[in-house]
Amino acid sequence: MPAAPALARRGVRPLFEPTDLELEKTGTVEIDLQVGAIQSRGPARVVVPDLELDVGLLPNLELDLDAAYAIEGTAGAPFSFDYPAPDSLWLAAKIGLFDWSDEDTHSPSAWALGVQLGPKFPAAAGTRGIGGEALLLIGHTRGATHLVLNAGAFADPHPDAISPRPVGLELGLDLERDLDAAGRFSVTGELSGVRFLSPDPGQLMASAGLTFSASDRVDLSLVALVGFLQGSDRYGMLLGVSPKLHFR
């Protein structure tokens, strides 16, 4: 049987998704699960799931685990969904470094600075070595609008025994705007790009979505994404659920 043609795990690293600067309270765990379908430049894949696990350890320290598992088709049968395509595991610390707020205006504003960094571990068959990723996070809130600028660099595990590891620079913007005073409905958006220093095609992606806070402990979301460069997926749709648990 020929090797899964996912172009050696789809040929390039997964799309860069900008993160927010929200730190979970000490003793709180948030599980962000997304499932859906994505059409790449080649075969389609079903994401089952995209996982982010956030654990609040201290007021300014959160432990994060990012992972994803997908089932992918082939170039000749793009919707056969025969081949597993897991992404690398990123175990990171998100650290809040500084925050400042101004509550004396009609439109309160705040600034925050943080970092997220840690090792990346190979998960797909044939991938090798330990990688790493580091992001500088600059957050700004004005009224109901929350913006976080992401800037960083990464070196992923090797996709196989002979190929060079993906290495590059990444830049992204994460946006959330509350639609009501209670904050139950909000719109979200992301814009992200990757400039590779390794021989991989560049990426540029935009997404938009709607989030509904069903309760203080559960959020539901629907997100659509579209890619613009050769290294990006073409389009996709993801449905998400984000429960929060308290262990103290």
Image: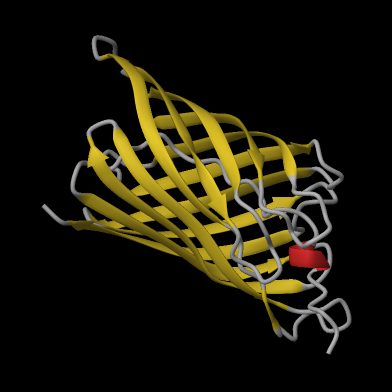
Q: At 49% from the left edge and 45% from the top edge, which residue is drawn? A: 188
Foreground residue among 20 and 59: 59
Residue 36, picture quadrant: bottom right
Foreground residue among 236 and 171: 171
Specify the farthest residue to the left. Answer: 248
Coloring scheme used: secondary structure
The number of discs equals 0
Q: Position of residue 154 (x, y in %)?
A: 64, 39
Residue 52 to residue 56: above or below: below
Q: At 70% from the left edge and 46% from the top edge, which residue is drawn? A: 205
Res. 144 in view? no
Q: At 28% from the left edge and 31% from the top edge, which residue is drawn? A: 60
In the picture, measured across the screen, residue 242 lies left or right of residue 76, that is left
Q: Position of residue 39 (x, y in %)?
A: 74, 67
Residue 51 to residue 18: above or below: below
Specify the farthest residue to the top. Answer: 104
In the picture, measured across the screen, residue 29 lies left or right of residue 133, that is left
Foreground residue among 129 and 106: 129
In the picture, measured across the screen, residue 189 lies left or right of residue 65, that is right
Q: Position of residue 186 (x, y in %)?
A: 40, 46
Q: At 83% from the left edge and 74% from the top edge, which residue is drawn? A: 5
Res. 84 in view? yes
Quarter of the picture holding the N terminus:
bottom right
Q: Position of residue 51 (x, y in %)?
A: 46, 61
